[in-house]
Amino acid sequence: MKTCDKGHNHSKGHSKGPKVPKNVFWFTFFHTASGYVGIYYFSLYYMRNNPEDFPEHYYTFHFWIYNFAMAFCLTNLVLARFKSPGKSCNTREETDGKCEKCNIYRIDRTHHCSNCKMCIIRMDHHCAWVSNCIGLNNHKNFFWYTFYTAIGGTYHVYLCLMYAFSSYPPATESYLARIWFFLHTLIVAIFTYFCITLINMQMKFIARNNTNLEYMKEIGMNWDFMKCIIWPIENDYDRGLIPNLIMVFGFDFCWWLLPTAPVNYYFYQGKYGLPKPTQKEVTELKVKYDLDDD
């Protein structure tokens, strides 16, 4: 039995596990949106109405920073949920691996999701919070959703603490509202830490052209990532840092930070030292970007 030097079992495959609940996305969306409302009503409200109690431009600075993080967080959350993760089509080549459930021949790094009931190209994992698979088409949006959730959540906790220890009067006389606000902030703090560990894992995977599914198949299910520990695994897909980043974020560097679809098709034309694409890869990319035959 093959094991890594840390004692993890490398023979463990991707277990089916229980079905994840559907439509958790709506809980995620409204939980995030309610956090925004709470921060504005409690922490930002009195900054705006009592500018004499704060330094100049204090409210404007915090308002725009928090709004920027939350806007990008919610935008990428919606896109990660409703964009197709990249459904595999039939390559019609019997040399490819065949999915017995979909009854199709598929290219390498394609996996069948029992929740979505289809084969996903370069599947990373099925995300319960997004209620969608994370694959070739929406991996970029999932990454930025996680990133801005970590940033916005950290800022949320900071603004909450600033409100709790400030000398200005409370935004409401309702103790229930204040209790709800602080309990909600506690949940935000826990989820923010989870996102920080998750973004650490995603950055290391993307830099090495790994996926979460491939990592779990090699290492086995474990919670070491919650301590920001990612074990190195063998990887045949690593093409170098820049090509690996382009695989997820797209060829146009100026669009990397924005929630746009990565145009990877042009990247497969041999630029940056990538191998010439196989006919199967060209077929999949044409399906993805709805391109005509050349």
Image: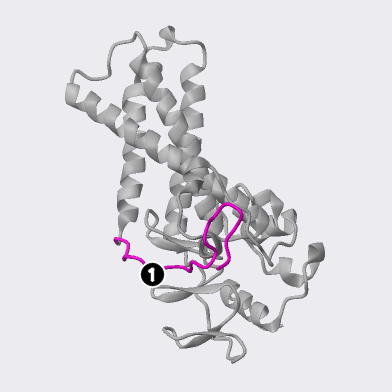
Name the spot of residue 41 as percent of width and height, x first.
31, 26
Residue furthest front in the image: 1
Horizontally, residue 236 falls left or right of residue 152, namely: right
Q: Is residue 106 at all visible to an observer of this figure?
A: yes
Say which of 274 and 33 sits in front: 274
Q: Amino acid at mark 1?
A: Lys
Q: Magenta includes 249? A: no
- In the rendered image of this protein, does residue 158 appear above or below residue 28? above
Count of picture labels = 1
Q: Is residue 258 at all visible to an observer of this figure?
A: no
Q: Residues within 10 Å of mark 1 (few under 14, many from 20)?
A: few
- In the rendered image of this protein, does residue 104 appear above or below residue 284? below
Dominant secondary structure (helix, strand or loop) of the stretch shown in magenta: loop
The chosen color scheme is: one colour
Say which of 208 and 56 sits in front: 208
Q: Magenta includes 7? A: yes
Name the spot of residue 148 as percent of width and height, x first.
50, 41
Rendered image quadrant of residue 191: top left
- Quadrant containing the C terminus is bottom right
Name the spot of residue 91 as percent of width and height, x first.
58, 86
Name the residue that disc number 1 marks.
16
Say which of 108 and 63 sits in front: 108
Q: Secondary structure at mark 1?
A: loop
Range covered by the magenta-colored residues: 1-21
Horizontally, residue 241 falls left or right of residue 112, namely: right
Horizontally, residue 5 falls left or right of residue 194, namely: right
Rendered image quadrant of residue 102: bottom left
- Quadrant containing the N terminus is bottom right
